[in-house]
Amino acid sequence: MTKRRLTTAEVEYNEVRANVLSRVDAKYVADAPFVFANRITVTAALSRIELFKMVQDVPGAIIECGVYKGNSLMLYMQLSMILEPYAINRSIIGFDTFEGFASIDKDEDPTDINESMFSDTDETLIQDMIDANDLVRPVNRIPRCEIVKGDILQTVPEFVKTRPDLVVAMLILDTDLYSSTKVALETFLPYMPKGAIVVLDEVAYRNFPGETSALRDVLDMNKIELKRLPFDSSVGYFRI
């Protein structure tokens, strides 16, 4: 969240939450995450769980474009470890600059964003926790989760050249921006079988219209059945 348009109540909530967090250490937060989770975080987790269940019978990778701090990516890794521990043909792959927005389109993306937004992250922390989970998961000699750092406009087209085995069961588009969403759609759609799912985290959302513009430019909107989750304000998805 860019926190560009917070209400007075949301500002007050954030202040109270920050005060409570200042009274505990990191282990306390990790052991009792829902004490400190906000509505948006819990909603996102519920959405990811529902979407994961939709592709459990579809082999292939779960690809997330827009990882940020890795919360959703690691949730997908945990879900795969728990619900399909021996699915050796399931990869979970996250693409992000890990340095903020890249390739902002002045015509398609909001004018009040900048490259420093979402730069408060450290991909080494995510990688360390991927490695830690690999110690305890079944069939851990076969990689399950990986991150790819860099501008999606370059990394995504290069990545598919390295993976002749690639099948994409779910494509999650959460970069918020037009160009990266468009490139991800154009690159990964040919790898998605019937029954696979494309997820847009900010579809039909005026504060970040880039994802929707990219979808419209790549696909005929009249030929996809775009759906929403009833409890999530901006996530949309469609089956191939």
Image: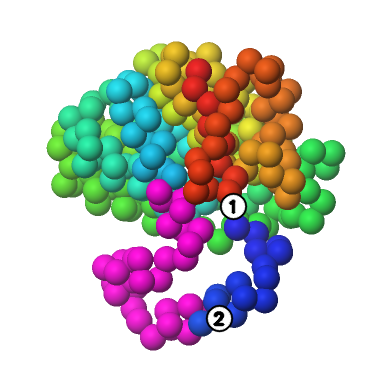
So how many labels did they put on this image?
2
The secondary structure type at the circle numbered 2 is helix
List x then y, in percent, for residue 127.
37, 49
- Horizontally, residue 237 falls left or right of residue 126, namely right
Crowd class of label 1 (few under 14; some 14 to 19; many from 20; radius 10 Å): some
Majority secondary structure of the magenta segment? helix
Q: Residue at x 64, y 38 (%)?
A: 203
Crowd class of label 2 (few under 14; some 14 to 19; many from 20; radius 10 Å): few
Give the answer, above or below, for where 164 lies relative to 135. Answer: above
Viewer can see residue 159: no
Depth check, front residue: 70 or 128: 70
**What range of the chain is rendered magenta?**
17-46
Spatial separation of the CA atoms under disc 2 and disc 1: 26 Å
Viewer can see residue 42: yes
Proximity of marks 2 and 1: CB atoms separated by less than 8 Å:
no
Residue 134 quadrant:
top left
Depth check, front residue: 103 or 86: 86
Q: Is residue 38 magenta?
A: yes
Nearer the N terminus, badge 2 or badge 1? 2
Residue 26 quadrant:
bottom left
Q: Residue at x 50, y 48 (%)?
A: 231
Going by the numbered disc 1, the residue's amino acid type is: Glu
Q: Residue at x 53, y 14 (%)?
A: 190
Identify the residue position indicated by label 1 in the image: 99
Identify the residue position indicated by label 2 in the image: 15
List x then y, in percent, for residue 67.
50, 46
